[in-house]
């Protein structure tokens, strides 16, 4: 082959490649245009709690389902449900209790985290050794869905701690400013270990051990949106679940994605913490010992016990309808 | 000279056994061992000292860095604490404008403060105040701007922590998009309402801490050492790996690397107590010192890591150069010893070769020239001296030997002459049937002083004589020859033995200045009737064995030994020798023959031997007697001449 021929061949090849790239871009744009665009607001800043969504997006599972999903993140000042309420998001993740409180307006697309991770952690050296020792002690917990479980927990054990609000940090607890604080097993509890606190220095109260393990993260949309976008909602549900399954089966790859996501948001992140969170979140989605079909679904019984607790505590005035609240899970509750 | 007898002395010694080889081997071995030991001990000593020193340095630098960071932050604390007290005492509470101007002037006076403000709970904000959280900050251009913080502060740690901990709190660092790496100091504000102390808000100061990394990076901790700053939860605030800052904590890394020891050390680091530990750093498990000191302002901990491997590398470099220098010295030493050894062994070897030839008998072999004044040169000179002495001695010896040989030859001649003087021919006597005679002489030296003699005076008379000259050797032999000549001559003139001896004595006296003397026995035997006239001049008494077996000693003396005494007279005695009687004459060489123990043969033994003989004939009797004497002497050196003469009358045949 002569040099001239080689150059000609190369040029032709380059043209083909360029054409191909341009064409595929155009095609992608055209495809995106043909897909249903969705904005999905996640409760909190990027972490393994949302690994399944990232993987569904990054591995093209949403696109394959005909969806063009944009992921948004809530923060301390602006919750995901706020974004859903003011129309900045089509869908949002929220705790079941928060969903039920907003029941008439919101409907559940899928129940992601089925097992409760909520817990109280108390300093042993401040005398927190059992439930009774919480009485009259200053503790902190969030004023969100967690408050309901704790209220029921304290009422059931007849203790009256002095509660101060807890936001996104457990620093006050770490510095001994409160005798106990709320924590998610998958997150704050592990941060404790990462602050050098050995497990034997604290007493833990896992709400699920006390029958107060309300299901947690679910994917919500406005009820009328669900009614008008059933297929889209179902496609989103399937693709999100597939994303979680991918995360379950490719954990280190998933951690890479989560960490990149956190770094893009300029947030502190470390791999062992995200690994711990991913493991616990996955264990709470794919709960050991449960039937495969119960994954991503909310059972009527779970719904009703949560709603009853909310009703009893005065968070809601009437029981919402399960079929309206969780239109895709009606049968599973039977 | 047989070359086969001297190979060992001249052959080359193998290097291993040679002086030079041993000298080199032991010097190298010993010096090498000493050198290695020195370097090793030095290395270990220095290592320990350097290690201790590095540990002290790590501690010192951690303390210093902590102090320096503290000094900057405590400065801010003082300012804000003052403002807070000012607010609490009420002097600025009443006037918003006064607070604002105070904020501005404080910011201007304290460039280290990036922003400062009051953040009050709404219910505790003075009514006439325009804002509950007046905040002032330094803009990028350096001017001071006024602002109000937003109202979500209740959730912030910088508000909640001082509120509930009821003490001032430094926040963890954070990145501010405008001001960079920041940290916030917040102090709770209180107001007394009745008896109660009520929390009304916090006073805050934002401080830029961009200098932190630089301050820590500048610590002289060596190439592989570094400093880190951690908060009270172990999270890195400053770390050479920027990606660790605010992301990782000691405990997250311990978890990721499954390093329980690291977790334990981390717990010590955040305990607030200073410390110093040996630490295996990083995945390479590099040996380091880890020192730390808690800050007084923030609850952070300044930690320094000093690599020991780095120290070791320096030390190993040092030891290696010491070893190299030592090795070079060793080589030099080797060369010097080689040359010295060669200067010793070469002449020694040359001397050895020469001495080998010398020992082989070649006295003309060339000896090496002695060089210098050392021991080898002395030895060489000594050998030369010895060789020269040896040569001289051998030359002398040759001369002496030659003269001895000549003298011996002359003595042999003398002996031959002497022996010729003695009658040896018994042939004439064998014709006579009435006589049996035999004589023999064994001289002790080559020339003896004894003699015997016999001859016929006429047909019937036979002279027999035995003598012993005093002394031995040539003088004795000469004296004997003279004596014998006189004796023969006198007997031919007169046959009386006594008179003969007197005349012989007179004749000898005439020329005997050294007063030599001769014992002499002589007698004349008449064969026809056995009459024997004899005279004895001091000689051993002869023995007669009678035919009836009796042994008689012929003891009669005639006079003194002939030779020295003038006027000596000698009597002639008579006895009768019957047919068959054996007369034995002998000298004292027989009785004084000695065995190995110097015991004399003695007259007793002679008498018993002679008495025991059956006298077959004279010849065999004398040879038997000589044999007996020799047996008695058993090889001992013969001290005197042995002379024997025996005569017997035989009955003429009918």
Image (spheres, coloured by chain):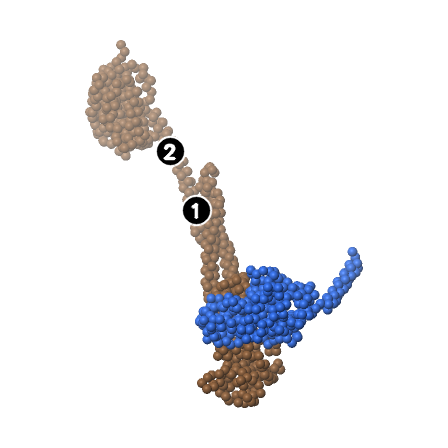
Q: Chain of mark 2?
A: B
| x 50%, y 59%: residue | B323
Q: Is residue B597 visible?
A: yes
The residue that mark 2 highlights is B407
Q: Residue at x 30, y 20 (%)?
A: B620
Say whether marks 1 and 2 touch (CB < 8 Å). no
Name the mark nearer the viewer: 1 or 2: 1
Element at label 2: helix
Please state if A206 lies on the left or on the right of B590 as rendered: right
Q: What chain is tagged by disc 1?
A: B
- For the C terminus of chain A, give its image quadrant: bottom right
Do discs 1 and 2 belong to a common subunit? yes
What color was chain B assigned in the picture?
brown
**Quarter assignment of residue B506:** top left
Give the chain letter for blue: A
Figure check: B318 above or below B80: above
Find residue A294 and report its horizontal and vertical position in percent: 59, 62
Q: Is residue B400 above or below residue A121?
A: above
**Residue pointed to by mark 1:** B383
User: Extreme top residue here?
Assistant: B654
- Which residue shows up at 50% across the image and 76% down it? A163
């Amino acid at each position: 082959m002569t040099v001239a021929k080689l150059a000609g061949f190369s040029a032709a090849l380059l043209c083909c490649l360029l054409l191909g790239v341009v064409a595929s871009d155009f095609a992608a744009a055209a495809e995106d245009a043909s897909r249903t665009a969705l904005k999905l607001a996640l409760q909190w800043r990027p972490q393994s709690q949302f690994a399944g969504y990232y993987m569904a997006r990054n591995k093209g599972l949403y696109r394959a389902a005909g969806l063009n999903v944009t992921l948004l993140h809530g923060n301390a000042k602006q919750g995901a449900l706020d974004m859903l309420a003011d129309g900045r998001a089509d869908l949002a993740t929220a705790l079941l209790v928060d969903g039920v409180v907003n029941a008439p307006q919101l409907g559940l697309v899928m129940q992601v985290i089925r097992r409760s991770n909520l817990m109280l952690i108390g300093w042993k050296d401040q005398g927190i050794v059992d439930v009774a020792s919480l009485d009259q002690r200053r503790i902190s917990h969030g004023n969100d869905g967690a408050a309901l479980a704790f209220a029921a927990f304290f009422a059931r054990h007849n203790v009256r701690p002095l509660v101060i609000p807890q936001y996104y940090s457990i620093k006050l607890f770490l510095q001994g400013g409160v005798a106990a604080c709320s924590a998610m097993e998958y997150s704050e509890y592990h941060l404790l270990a990462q602050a050098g606190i050995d497990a034997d220095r604290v007493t833990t109260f896992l709400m699920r051990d006390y029958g107060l393990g309300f299901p947690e993260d679910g994917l919500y949309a406005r009820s009328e949106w669900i009614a008008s976008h059933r297929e889209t909602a179902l496609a989103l549900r399937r693709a999100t679940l597939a994303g979680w399954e991918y995360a379950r089966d490719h954990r280190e790859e998933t951690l890479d994605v989560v960490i990149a996501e956190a770094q893009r948001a300029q947030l502190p992140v470390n791999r062992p913490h995200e690994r711990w969170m991913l493991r616990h979140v996955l264990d709470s989605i794919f709960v050991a010992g449960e039937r495969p079909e119960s994954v991503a679904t909310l059972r009527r019984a779970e719904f009703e016990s949560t709603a009853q607790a909310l009703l009893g505590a005065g968070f809601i005035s009437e029981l919402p309808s399960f079929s309206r609240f969780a239109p895709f899970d009606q049968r599973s509750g039977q | 000279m047989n070359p086969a007898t001297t190979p060992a002395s001249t052959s080359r010694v193998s290097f291993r056994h040679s002086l030079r080889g041993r000298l080199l081997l032991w010097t190298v071995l010993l010096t090498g061992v000493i050198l290695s030991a020195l370097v090793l001990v030095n290395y270990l000593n220095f290592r320990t000292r350097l290690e201790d020193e590095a540990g002290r340095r790590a501690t010192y630098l951690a303390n210093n860095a902590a102090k320096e960071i503290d000094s900057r932050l405590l400065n801010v604390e003082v300012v804000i604490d003052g403002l807070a007290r000012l607010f609490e005492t009420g002097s600025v509470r009443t006037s918003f404008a006064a607070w604002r101007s105070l904020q501005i002037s404080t910011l201007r006076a304290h460039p280290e403060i990036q922003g400062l403000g009051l953040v009050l709970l709404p219910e505790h904000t003075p009514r006439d105040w325009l804002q509950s959280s007046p905040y002032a900050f330094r803009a990028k251009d350096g001017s001071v701007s006024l602002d109000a913080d937003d109202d979500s502060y209740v959730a912030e740690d910088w508000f909640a922590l001082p509120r509930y901990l009821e003490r001032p709190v430094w926040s963890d660092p954070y990145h501010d998009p405008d001001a960079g790496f920041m940290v916030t100091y917040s102090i709770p504000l209180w107001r007394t309402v009745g008896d109660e102390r009520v929390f009304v808000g916090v006073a805050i100061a934002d401080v830029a801490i961009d200098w932190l990394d630089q301050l820590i990076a500048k610590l002289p901790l060596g190439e592989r050492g570094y400093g880190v700053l951690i908060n009270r939860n172990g999270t890195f605030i400053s770390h050479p790996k920027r990606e660790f800052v605010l992301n990782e904590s000691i405990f997250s890394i311990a978890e990721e690397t499954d390093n329980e020891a690291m977790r334990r050390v981390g717990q010590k680091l955040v305990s607030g107590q200073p410390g110093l530990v040996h630490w295996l750093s990083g995945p390479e498990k590099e040996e380091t010192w880890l020192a730390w000191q808690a800050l007084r302002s923030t609850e952070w901990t300044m930690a320094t890591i000093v690599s020991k491997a780095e120290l070791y590398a320096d030390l190993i470099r040092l030891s290696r150069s010491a070893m190299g220098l030592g090795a070079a010295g060793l080589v030099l030493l080797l060369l010097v010893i080689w040359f010295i050894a060669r200067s010793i062994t070469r002449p020694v070897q040359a001397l050895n070769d020469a001495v080998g030839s010398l020992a082989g008998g070649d006295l003309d072999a060339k000896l090496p020239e002695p060089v210098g004044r050392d021991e080898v040169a002395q030895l060489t000179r000594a050998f030369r001296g010895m060789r020269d002495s040896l040569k001289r001695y051998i030359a002398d010896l040759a001369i002496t030997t030659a003269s001895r040989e000549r003298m011996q030859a002359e003595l042999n001649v003398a002996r031959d002459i002497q022996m010729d003087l003695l009658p040896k021919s018994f042939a004439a006597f064998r014709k006579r049937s009435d006589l049996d005679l035999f004589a023999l002489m064994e001289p002790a030296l080559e020339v003896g002083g004894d003699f015997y003699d016999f001859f016929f005076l006429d047909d019937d008379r036979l002279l027999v004589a035995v003598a012993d000259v005093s002394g031995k050797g040539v003088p004795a032999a000469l004296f004997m020859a003279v004596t014998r000549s006189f004796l023969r001559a006198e007997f031919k003139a007169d046959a009386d033995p006594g008179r003969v001896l007197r005349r012989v004595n007179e004749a000898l006296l005439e020329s005997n200045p050294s007063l030599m003397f001769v014992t002499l026995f002589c007698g004349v035997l008449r064969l026809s009737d056995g009459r024997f006239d004899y005279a004895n001049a001091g000689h051993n008494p002869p023995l007669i064995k009678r035919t009836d077996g009796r042994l008689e000693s012929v003891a009669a003396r005639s006079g003194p030994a002939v030779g020295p005494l003038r006027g000596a007279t000698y009597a002639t005695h008579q006895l009768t020798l019957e047919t068959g009687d054996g007369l034995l004459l002998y000298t004292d060489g027989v009785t004084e023959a000695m065995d190995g123990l110097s015991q004399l043969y003695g007259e007793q033994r002679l008498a018993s031997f002679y008495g025991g003989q059956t006298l077959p004939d004279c010849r065999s009797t004398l040879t038997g007697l000589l044999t007996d004497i020799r047996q008695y002497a058993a090889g001992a050196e013969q001290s005197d001449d042995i002379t024997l003469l025996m005569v017997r009358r035989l009955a003429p045949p009918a």
